[in-house]
Image: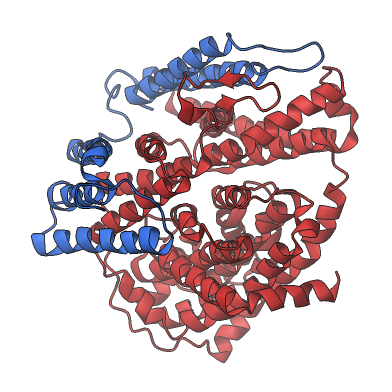
Amino acid sequence: MDPNDLLLGFSIALAPTNLLFAFFGVFLGTIIGALPGIGPSAGVAVLLPVTFGMPPVTAMIMLAGIYYGAMYGGTITSVLINTPGESSSVMTTLDGFQMALKGRAGAALGMAAIGSFIAGTLSVVLLMVAAPPLADLAVSFGPPEYFALMVLGLTTLASLTSGSVVKGLLVAVVGLLLGTVGIDLMLGAPRYTFENVNLLDGIDFLPVAVGLFAIGELLFNLYRPVRAEPIKAKLSGLLPTRQDWRDSWASIGRGTLIGFFVGMLPGAGATISSFLAYATEKRLSKHPERFGTGVIEGVAAPESANNAASTGALVPLMALGIPGSGTTAVMLGALTMYGMQPGPLLVSTHPDVFWGLVASMYVGNVMLLILNLPLAPVFASILRVPYSVLIPIIIGIALFGVYSVENNLFNVGITILFGAIGFAMRLYGYPPAPLVLALVLGPMLEKALRQSLQMSLGSPEIFVTRPVSAFILAFALLAVLFPMISWFRARRAARTAAA
Amino acid sequence: MSRADVVVALLIAAGFGAALWEASSFQYGTEFAPGPGFAPVWLSGIGLFLSLLIAFSAWHDMRTAGRATAGKGKEALDKRGLGRVAATVLGLVGMMLLVPWIGFVLAVLAFLLFLTLFVQGLRLVVGIPAALLTVAFVYVVFVRFLGVPIPAGPLGF
């Protein structure tokens, strides 16, 4: 790593405009994370249109700020109302809420903020170290390797999202099929356009993402309203005591490493890393029976892990151009909207974007620490705003936002349609993230597949004769087979038990 | 698994069936490479298989669970909740239809008033300011600040 690259990054990140939008990003991210029912995917998708007209680096700084800011914000709801603000804070509720009941809500929020800061900062160092060499390696990849990587990303996300693996895969196939709509880029033939000019360019990912993540989620909240009353906790003593430090420093370190490396894996992300970090701490503890009763390690480990995972997830996005989650899929779509070609060349062709983003994350984590320690009571007070008042605000921003993408009502219609579909998907247990990821990756995946088969004169052997693609595809196959075998075993066991 | 799960999976299967039918009219391949129809045919075929697998699995579970619980599912659907969702979606569709007549800003305002006052049942002192302030905020951000040209109504905005 050339130190000049980081200096370039800081010169960009410390520019007044970028500092301002980094602040907006982390501030809005904290609020989004704190609100139950709207996650970082919805937040990034709804606010993406606000970044139109900004330089790409400023926009990415703000969007990334929303993403990792949401990880901080999720803690507030977990601790104060025993409801995770987003899925990656589920584990924090176990001990965080118990600490609040014991009058230690301030300590839980303080340790979560400090743990997140340490994890966030260390994981940016790891991002700096890991992404450029990975991008250099990936420059030598051809279409078969890219095809294999994208298949791995889709299969792991489909397999690891909650619910049935088959449903996850089915949703990914729907996304891939939607990605084929429009004029075929290689031969110019129209597909599924039904003579509608709005479909000739394909289905834009943003109206679909806003529909599935934001409108669908809000419709679900209208169906089953969120009733969450924060407990009346005294938010004093935010700074950890010496004993808290003694109990937590190792958990923060382990949480950071687990979070970063799990976050790098496509599909795994912040939620799984926080589960793993919590389970690891419980296993290593001399008093595992105390977990769940309000121990500070039970807050420090998952909070460090989810923050490190959000940075780890940027490694495949920035180095390979392959997102591993719904949120990073929206960020990848954003990069394309700003006219950049995501992929391994991004680091070398747009060093300002990569290094500016990296440097801004150091700054953003400091901002979040400053915001979250003294202002924790302010963010907590947001939870007292009735959710019913937030619904029209979010829908209003979403409708104007999707209209502004191409200034046409067709996109608004697509958003409404996918909002209804997103609601039905939640109701019947179909995960929405694989659909958005597949829609974003679909055209690239198809292009890589067709180029590969052109290279091999139509023989699919090219995917198994090239060692890298064969290795990655084998992993992808395992990613599907393992959960499916477990699913069939669980069904058989349940049937036997019922008999 | 409930009867609704079977119906949903069969509806998805029907969608994939239609997609496969449409894809059969695309050129499948050229001499040495896949054509525009290659991915749609394979994807709709795989989707059809997976959705039928889910439908069969849901149907099998339903049968195993016995007739006593068949159709009830994991939990009964909340009809009032579904009513709120249906009203909101219909309100959004109505908003789309209103845009050419009254413009985007007023159509969104009308929808938000409908949502807050009728669907959510908020009090007037909460619902009206929430709708008005939201529209004013997004108008300033998107139209004044970002210069998005929105369809104007009779009042010029």
Across and down, in percent, residue A95 comes to: 46, 69
Write down the quadrant of residue B92 in the picture: top left
Write down the quadrant of residue A28 in the picture: bottom left
Q: Is residue A79 left or right of residue A460?
A: left
A481, A295: nearer the viewer: A481
Q: Is residue A450 left or right of residue A241?
A: right
Write down the quadrant of residue A60 in the picture: bottom right
Observer able to see residue A292:
no
A498, A169: nearer the viewer: A169
Label total for image: 0
A342, B157: nearer the viewer: B157
Across and down, in percent, residue A86 comes to: 45, 58
Across and down, in percent, residue A235 comes to: 37, 84
Q: Is residue A488 left or right of residue A105?
A: right
A415, A314: nearer the viewer: A415
Q: Residue at x 57, y 13 (%)?
A: B23
Q: Which residue is drawn at 63% across and 71% down?
A: A361
Q: In this view, does B83 lie to the left or right of A391?
A: left
Point out the image quarter for the N terminus of chain A: bottom right
* On screen, residue A423 above or below A47: above
Across and down, in percent, residue A491 comes to: 51, 28
Q: Which residue is drawn at 44% across and 23% down?
A: A499
* On screen, residue A155 above or below A291: above
Chain B painted colour: blue
Chain A painted colour: red
Q: Residue at x 61, y 57 (%)?
A: A273
Observer able to see residue B30:
yes
Q: Which colour scheme is used?
A: by chain
